[in-house]
Image (cartoon, rainbow, N blue to C red):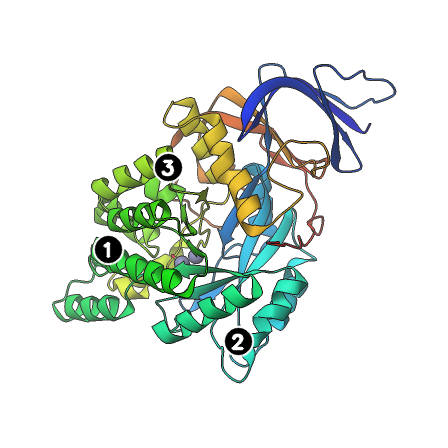
Amino acid sequence: MDMIIKNGTVVNASGSFRADVGVRDGKIVCIAESIEAGSCENIIDASGKLVLPGAIDAHTHLAMPFGGTVSSDDYFAGTRAAACGGTTTVFDFALQDFGEKMTDTVKRRDALCAPDAAVDYSFHVAVKDVENGLLDSLEECVKYGVPSFKVFMVYDFGVTDGVFYRVLQKAKEVGALIEVHAENNELVNTLTKQYLSEGKTSAWYHYMSRPEFVEGEADERAIQWAKASGAPLYIVHLANKQGVEAVTKAKDEGYKIYAETCPQYLEFTSDVYKRDDGRNFVCSPPMKGKESQDAIWEAIRRGDIDTIATDHCPFQSAEKDWGINDFTKIPNGCAGIENMYPYMLSAAGEGKITFEQAVKLCSENPAKIFGCKDKGVIAVGKDADIVIYDPQLDFTITNDKMHSDCDHTIWEGIKLHGYPVQTYSRGRLVYDNGEFLGERGWGKFVKCSLK
Ligand code: DUC
Ligand code: ZN
Ligand code: ZN
């Protein structure tokens, strides 16, 4: 064996147990009450620690051209930060160009990502163009190992309801999964225009132009199309109570509707937009009111939220400052890739959820939903993507301790109880007590399959 992690408590979504974990050639090869060291010289003592599957962040925007600039973490910086927060697989959104086949979109982004990624990665294709036979190119992409596609209901690259519906129909036919960014574009544009014309330009009006009902209505509409088409649907970054209720109802009716939320919606409310640095929190959908936040936590506890992901899309302070006098000029997005797993595990330590639930939301469920067969659980035969977590280690988030290229973080000053001490990516130590030890280009493309 190349490594034995001894005396830790293994936590999977299905339960926790004391065990030693043996690793060889990047795979977990043995889990037993006690594993003899034999000739293995790399023995890790995990006494008092939790041994967890690495997290899977199913929602990131690395090096993404957006809002007049490019998000500040490229594939190296973003995956380096991921590793340091216990995330060992990252899904990035590859934005289709007009006239481009979906597989070509993936290959174009993979050419950028492969030389840089420090942890394993895969893609979802963000669909813009389905004309001239491009809708059919979904099938080839599914076979290539990227079976998940996202449609935006907002932004200049958003799709119409008709295109959304056609994508769902195709997904049903070829066994793909469609994700949706649900906000009502017409309402966003109308409210934005109203506020600007009244001289209401601060970050608060970012929230006011995208309030609860703007997202809730779009969630309901998206679910309606999914039900009618018979295709499953994954709602990204769900942040409002009305949407939570629609998801719960659809699940209760037996539809395959998945919901993701993000740590920022669990920690912050729309009040952040009243702060002097409110623009740093501008992302879409925006943080909502306390009632929505409470509803999301409740949905997490009863299992109606399936995954936690970050929507990691940071921009530098100077770029956020473009919108000091006009909220529409603030590039949308915040950092979170290094904070997701520590935040959810700390919430488990505080008793808000269980450690098993944290692992399910951040690792096992994304692995299952997006078809990463080798990830998401500490089990023999799986990749040795392992986090050693100290539940007693206090950690205050400050940007100087983060491993992103962004010059600030919305998580500044947030106190966590418990923190990862080591991260292994396929058996290789990539993070050790505050220090990134990984390597540019180590990360491999993960072929996904929903079959
Ligand atoms: N929302 C953001 O805040 N940033 C990137 C894309 C998105 O939908
Ligand atoms: Zn989005
Ligand atoms: Zn996003």
- Name the amino acid, label 2: Leu
- What percent of the width, then of the height, locates residue 267? 33, 38
Residues packed near mark 3 inside 10 Å, few (<14), some (14 to 19) or many (20 plus): many
Q: Is residue 414 above or below residue 280?
A: above
Q: Where is mark 3, residue-wise? A: 300
Nearest the eye: 319 or 375: 375
Amino acid type of disc 3?
Answer: Ile
Residue 84 visible from this viewpoint: yes
Disc 2 versus disc 1: nearer the observer:
2
Q: Which residue is mark 2?
A: 135
Mark 3 and mark 2 lie on one chain; the one further toward the N terminus is 2
Q: Residue at x 57, y 36 (%)?
A: 86
- For the view shown, which residue lies furthest in the front direction? 253
Residue drawn at the location 39% of the way across and 37% of the way down: 303
Q: How many marks?
A: 3
Residue 57: assigned label: none
Q: Classify mark 1: residues with Cα within 10 Å, few (<14), some (14-19) or many (20+).
A: many
Question: Mark 3, mark 1: which one is toward the viewer?
Answer: 3
Badge 2 density bin: few <14, some 14–19, many ≥20, Cα 10 Å: some
Q: Nearer the viewer, residue 448 or 438?
A: 448
Q: Earlier in the sequence, mark 3 or mark 1?
A: 1
Q: Which mark is residue 207?
A: 1
The local secondary structure at tag 1 comes to helix
Q: Secondary structure at mark 3?
A: helix
Q: Is residue 267 left or right of residue 404?
A: left
Mark closer to the chain start, 2 or 1: 2
